[in-house]
Image (tube, rainbow, N blue to C red):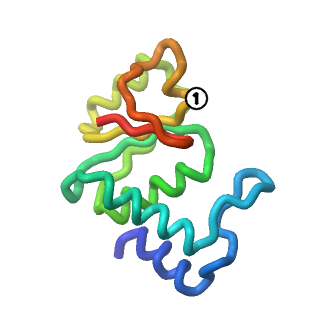
Amino acid sequence: MNLSDYLTHNSRIFREKLALAHGMAPFASWRELRQRAEKLATGIGLPLSSRAAIESKNCPEYVEILFACWAAGLIVVPINAKLHKREVELLECSKASMVFVSEEIETCPDRNQTVTRSPCLVASQ
């Protein structure tokens, strides 16, 4: 069983019920979350069992990316968003083929700027 199966199951049972919120603001129903995650999963383009790292503060897109990675058959490498740049360099040990980084982290002056932008999180290969 893959953790993305949980999303598939809930999207069938709870279709329009709220799955994610950002504070008090609704973000996505179970159906919308599944659609967003599946769309992202098809665009990732990595082989099964590849590693994808995520460095982000708490936001709904983090959960969306988790489900997308699991749906794509990837291994997720979570990275603490409060790590110093020297500590993040340990990412190389994870052998991640892709890194999702939230904009507020990506734009910090002591971070690598070679990433592609998207709404809350950006991806780098």
Residue 108 percent location from the top left of the image: 54, 19
Badge 1 local density, few (<14 within 10 Å), some, or many (20+)? Answer: few
Which residue bears the numbered disc 1?
A: 104
Q: Where on the picture, by quarter, is residue 38?
A: bottom left
Residue shown at 80%/55% (left/top)? Answer: 24
Location of residue 104 with respect to 72 vertically, above or below:
above
Of 16 and 77, the residue lying toward us: 16
Give 116 or 102, whichever is nearer the viewer.
Answer: 116
Q: Is residue 65 left or right of residue 13?
A: left
Q: The residue tagged with tag 1: helix, strand or loop?
A: helix
Instruction: Report the residue that reaches farthest toward the bottom.
Output: 13
Residue 94 location, quadrant:
top left
What x and y, as percent, mark residue 121? 50, 41
- What residue type is disc 1 on? Glu
Q: How many marks?
A: 1
Instruction: State left or right for residue 103 relative to residue 3.
Output: right
Along the line of sight, the residue nearer the viewer: 49 or 40: 40
Front residue of 15/3: it is 15
> What x and y, as percent, mark residue 103?
54, 32
Q: In the image, residue 114 lies at what x, y percent?
A: 36, 24
Q: Quadrant of the N terminus?
A: bottom left
Tell me: residue 76, above or below residue 100: below
In the displayed structure, 42 sits above or below 30; it is: above
Q: Residue at x 53, y 49 (%)?
A: 62
